[in-house]
């Protein structure tokens, strides 16, 4: 449960009375938003989401059966894959989610950085760069020590399966190994709203808790007497809570409403956030729709067909093994007493054919051809065949570059959306939390003074094309002669290449050395023993 600075409900105003009501209701706060109005907005958003639920459930049933179901809460540990006969889609979903984790937010690797912005002078850049690099290392260390890798992988599974995922990012309690704590919110619990800028910045989350859990999470909250009496008679009873984070001005309003059904809805806590703790992101967005669409939705016809083909193949195999038998109705054979076990003697009438097998009309070879084609199309739609690990032991630099370019083309559009909807809000909120706790210097990533630099493998793959073009230009200028080479600013080129390669800013000097100061000598590279012997 999100816990910002809480404000108690407005208790100064006298309770208002409604005609015919049995008791007083909570007075409306100064901003006019009441618990009932918030619940009405939540129900309206959930009704708009209802169109998607059957589609999402179908995707979960065939591609991610262990996800939380939309039809009922289910029981933890229950079997949810009984309707699944072909495992191609679940395996492809896990591989694509693992590829996203490795290409966007690889664990224990630097996948982002901070660099001086364009508004700073060269002298200021040299002074600020080491500080920003240390701050990026501190933020990265908090991500690595937290449960981020576990929860973001689960969010990527939802993203691939149903096209929309939600990640809750909270501030951990003092003394925890990391200041950040993450929770992958199941889509069955999250109800989202799209803002005017096209972002999923409005979030509702419905959960249930016992009275003891409510009092522990919200100390000092007003609990209705009817709910307390009910909890005394049934201590394990769980009561629904609706948590909302909605945009308001330059920040976000946070509120939690107790909707027990035993009394009027009431506030449990309220507060404000500078950035939303709920980070919602999509794989693909169709015009006019708030929720995203997934690659599983595109491949769902093939997934369902492959599942049915395997089911029919198994039924046909069962018939081929056990057989289908026929017998004349001669008054002697009783089908109810026949047992096909070794040593069985089956009586038959004189002149009767007895028990004879029925020919199997199915052809396994044709069904296998159809199934192979369906499985290939499923893997292609989920990018498994194109993002699969390399099997070659050695690859040339050109082959590596071409593979990186292919990966950038495949995930370029999705990466652009994930960068805007997931990576940037994630890092902005992490900087805000750690800055408030005094663990990093007080700076703002505004794009002018400080810029956010994405250094994930996929971001580096996208930069390889620009780097390759620049290196070809340098080679061409060198071939044209000294006059063409004189047009190259070597220091500026080296700085640009350093930024493109993700080199730490503290290693790049903004101001070149004065002419009278000799450049530092770099040690010669280490040579293999056989090359050093012939050098």
Image: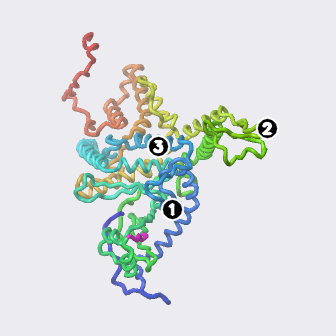
Which residue matches tag 1? 72
Mark 2 crowdedness (10 Å alpha carbons): few <14, some 14-19, many ≥20:
few
Furthest residue toward left: 517
Q: Is residue 169 left or right of residue 204?
A: left
Range of magenta residues: 236-240
Furthest residue toward bottom: 20
Badge number at residue 350: 2
Q: Is residue 239 magenta?
A: yes
Residue 276: x %, y % from top left: 39, 60
Q: Nearer the viewer, residue 283 or 524?
A: 283
Query: Earlier along the polypeptide chain: callout 2 or callout 3?
Result: 3
Furthest residue toward right: 351
Residue 25: x %, y % from top left: 42, 83
Which residue matches tag 3? 94
Residue 127 figure quarter: top left
- Confirm whether residue 518 shows in the render: yes
Mark 1 crowdedness (10 Å alpha carbons): few <14, some 14-19, many ≥20:
few
């Amino acid at each position: 449960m999100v816990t910002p600075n809480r404000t108690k409900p407005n208790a100064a105003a006298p309770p208002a009375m409604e005609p015919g009501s049995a008791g007083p209701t909570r007075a409306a706060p100064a901003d006019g938003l009441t618990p009932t109005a918030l619940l009405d907005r939540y129900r309206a958003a959930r009704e708009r989401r209802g169109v998607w639920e059957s589609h999402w459930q179908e995707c979960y049933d065939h591609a991610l059966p262990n996800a939380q179901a939309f039809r009922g809460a289910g029981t933890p540990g229950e079997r949810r894959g009984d309707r699944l006969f072909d495992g191609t889609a679940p395996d492809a979903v896990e591989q694509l989610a693992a590829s996203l984790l490795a290409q966007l937010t690889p664990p224990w690797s630097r996948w982002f950085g901070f660099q001086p912005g364009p508004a700073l002078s060269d002298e200021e850049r040299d002074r600020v760069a080491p500080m920003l690099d240390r701050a990026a290392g501190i933020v990265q260390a908090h991500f690595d020590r937290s449960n981020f890798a576990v929860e973001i992988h689960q969010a990527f599974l939802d993203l691939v399966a149903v096209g929309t995922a939600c990640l809750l990012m909270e501030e951990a309690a003092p003394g925890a190994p990391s200041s950040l704590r993450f929770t992958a919110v199941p889509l069955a619990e999250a109800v989202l709203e799209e803002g005017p800028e096209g972002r999923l910045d409005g979030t509702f989350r419905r959960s249930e808790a016992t009275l003891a859990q409510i009092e522990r999470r919200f100390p000092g909250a007003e609990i209705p007497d009817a709910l307390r009496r009910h909890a005394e008679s049934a201590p394990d009873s769980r009561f629904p809570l609706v948590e909302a984070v909605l945009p308001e001005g330059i920040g976000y309003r946070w509120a939690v409403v107790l909707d027990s059904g035993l009394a009027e809805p009431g506030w449990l806590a309220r507060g404000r956030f500078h950035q939303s703790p709920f980070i919602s992101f999509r794989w693909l967005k169709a015009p006019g729709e708030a929720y995203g669409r997934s690659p599983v939705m595109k491949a769902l016809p093939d997934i369902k067909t492959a599942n049915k083909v395997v089911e029919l193949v198994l039924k046909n195999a069962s018939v081929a093994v056990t057989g289908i038998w026929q017998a004349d109705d001669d008054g002697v054979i009783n089908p109810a007493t026949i047992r096909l076990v070794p040593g069985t003697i089956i009586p038959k009438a004189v002149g009767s054919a007895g028990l004879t097998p029925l020919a199997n009309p199915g052809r396994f070879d044709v069904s296998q051809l159809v199934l192979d084609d369906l499985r290939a199309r499923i893997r292609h739609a989920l990018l498994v065949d194109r993002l699969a690990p390399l099997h070659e032991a050695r690859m040339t630099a050109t082959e590596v570059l071409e593979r990186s370019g292919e990966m950038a083309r495949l995930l370029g559009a999705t990466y652009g959306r994930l960068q805007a909807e997931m990576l940037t809000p994630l890092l902005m909120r992490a900087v805000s939390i750690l800055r408030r706790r005094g663990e990093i210097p007080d700076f703002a990533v505004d794009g002018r003074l400080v810029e956010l630099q994405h250094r994930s493998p996929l971001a580096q793959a996208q930069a390889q094309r620009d780097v390759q073009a620049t290196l070809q230009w340098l080679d061409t200028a060198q071939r044209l002669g000294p006059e063409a080479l004189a047009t190259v600013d070597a220091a500026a080129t080296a700085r640009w290449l350093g930024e493109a390669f993700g080199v730490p800013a503290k290693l790049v000097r903004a101001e070149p050395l004065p002419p009278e100061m000799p450049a530092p000598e770099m040690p010669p590279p280490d040579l293999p023993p056989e090359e050093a012997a012939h050098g």
